[in-house]
Amino acid sequence: MRILGLDVGQKTIGVAISDPLGFTAQGITTIRRQNKVKDIEMLKKICNEYEVETIVIGLPKNMNGSIGFAGEKIIEFSELIKSEIELKIEFWDERLTTVAAHRAMLEADMSRGKRKKIVDKIAATYILQGYLDRIANMR
């Protein structure tokens, strides 16, 4: 059982995948967004390659828990993914995941250029790992 984690932004999509047992998340790539058709093609390719069963998408919420404009765009994009890829989709509250990713990279003394290239992939890893941890705690 592999689970795909996505951090969907306007310009990029950070992608992470779980190990086959669903314990750990690992960042695999950052997709440079071109258009919806090509974005979906790339996601389909990854889902087929890793035999994905579920997709976890980071849902940006306002600090009060409400869903704003960005969250609505993510929900809209997730509907497209669901109709084209036909896999189960779960949402994960992604508040502060990008902040956590930046903090981890700063602590690793990573250059600004390197951070910019991988921040979305790291954020996707945080999103997916949070989801995997919740599943493990429910067992």
Image (cartoon, grey):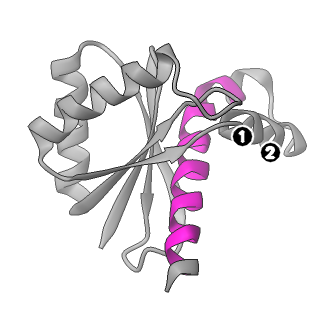
* In this picture, residue 73 sits left or right of residue 79: right
State the residue at coordinates (66%, 23%): 116
Q: What residue type is labelled 1?
A: Ala
- Residue under pointer 2: 104
Q: Distance between the residues labelled 2 and 1?
A: 5 Å
Left or right: residue 32 compared with residue 109: left
| Residue 118 in magenta stretch | yes
* Amino acid type of the residue that numbered disc 2 sits on in the rendered structure: Ala
- In the depicted structure, whether residue 105 falls above or below residue 9: below
Q: Which residue is drawn at 56% across and 69% down?
A: 134
Horizontal side of 111 relative to 119 (left or right) equals right
Number of numbered discs on residues: 2
From what the image shows, is residue 96 above or below residue 62? below
| In front of the other: 130 or 2 | 130
Q: What segment is highlighted magenta in the picture?
A: 115-136
Q: Quadrant of residue 99?
A: top right
